[in-house]
């Protein structure tokens, strides 16, 4: 029996079904098969998943990190000017916005994958930041 014959038989059976309960069971069965197919072929990502993953992995430019590191060291050494301190705070705001956007995308991906954000982070190898104790 080939796939086309099976499809034709299913279509014919569906056309003949008048009972809503049977149709609902059939819909449930088809949804379950679709979910199993997705689980069996996890390497195929939807366009939404691909875009979310791309944006989750998108970081700040290295120049931003380098400048932050320089200004952070200056602040810790108490040798920072008022202008540099303002620049540092702007960089921190930028970094926090990027983190918030990343978390938002992780939440959306968790919804698509029907799992918790913690499970998505674990699956992607993303570790939460360590607390900064001073």
Image: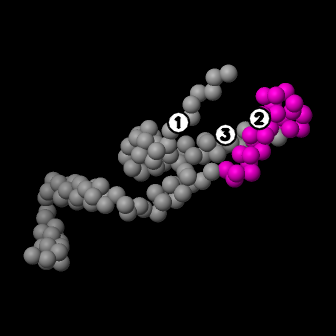
Asked if the stretch drawn in magenta spans residue 20, the answer is no
Q: Nearer the viewer, residue 105 or 59?
A: 59
Displayed quadrant of residue 118:
top left
The residue indicated by pointer 2 is 72
Displayed quadrant of residue 32:
bottom left
Q: Which residue does the image show at 74% across and 40% down from the upper left?
A: 69
Q: Which residues are magenta?
A: 60-86
Q: Which residue does the image show at 23% across and 58% down from the upper left?
A: 33
Q: Could you tell me residue 15's position as x and y percent?
A: 16, 70
Q: Nearer the viewer, residue 41 or 33?
A: 41
Q: Which residue does the image show at 55% across and 43% down from the upper left?
A: 103
The residue indicated by pointer 1 is 128
Q: Earlier in the sequence, mark 3 or mark 1?
A: 3
The residue indicated by pointer 3 is 96
Q: Disc 2 on helix, strand or loop? A: helix
Q: How busy is the neighbourhood of tag 2: few (under 14 within 10 Å), some, or many (20 plus)?
A: some
Question: Looking at the image, can residue 95 be seen?
Answer: yes
**Which part of the image, by quadrant, shows the N terminus?**
bottom left
Q: Earlier in the sequence, mark 2 or mark 1?
A: 2
Question: Looking at the image, can residue 12 be seen?
Answer: no
Q: Tell me: residue 129, above or below residue 3.
A: above
Q: Could you tell me residue 129's position as x and y percent?
A: 56, 34
Q: Disc 3 on helix, strand or loop? A: helix
Q: Nearer the viewer, mark 3 or mark 1?
A: 1
């Amino acid at each position: 029996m080939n796939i086309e014959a099976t499809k034709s038989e299913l279509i014919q059976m569906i056309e003949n079904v008048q009972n809503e309960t049977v149709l609902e069971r059939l819909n449930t069965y088809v949804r379950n098969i679709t979910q199993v197919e997705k689980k069996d072929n996890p390497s195929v990502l939807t366009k939404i998943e691909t875009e979310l993953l791309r944006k989750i992995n998108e970081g700040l430019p290295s120049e931003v990190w380098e400048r932050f590191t320089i200004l952070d060291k200056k602040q810790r050494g108490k040798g920072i000017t008022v202008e540099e301190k303002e620049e540092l705070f702007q960089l921190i705001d930028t970094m926090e916005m990027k983190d918030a956007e990343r978390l938002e995308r992780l939440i959306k991906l968790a919804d698509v994958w029907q799992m918790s954000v913690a499970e998505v982070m674990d699956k992607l190898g993303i570790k939460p930041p360590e607390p900064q104790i001073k």
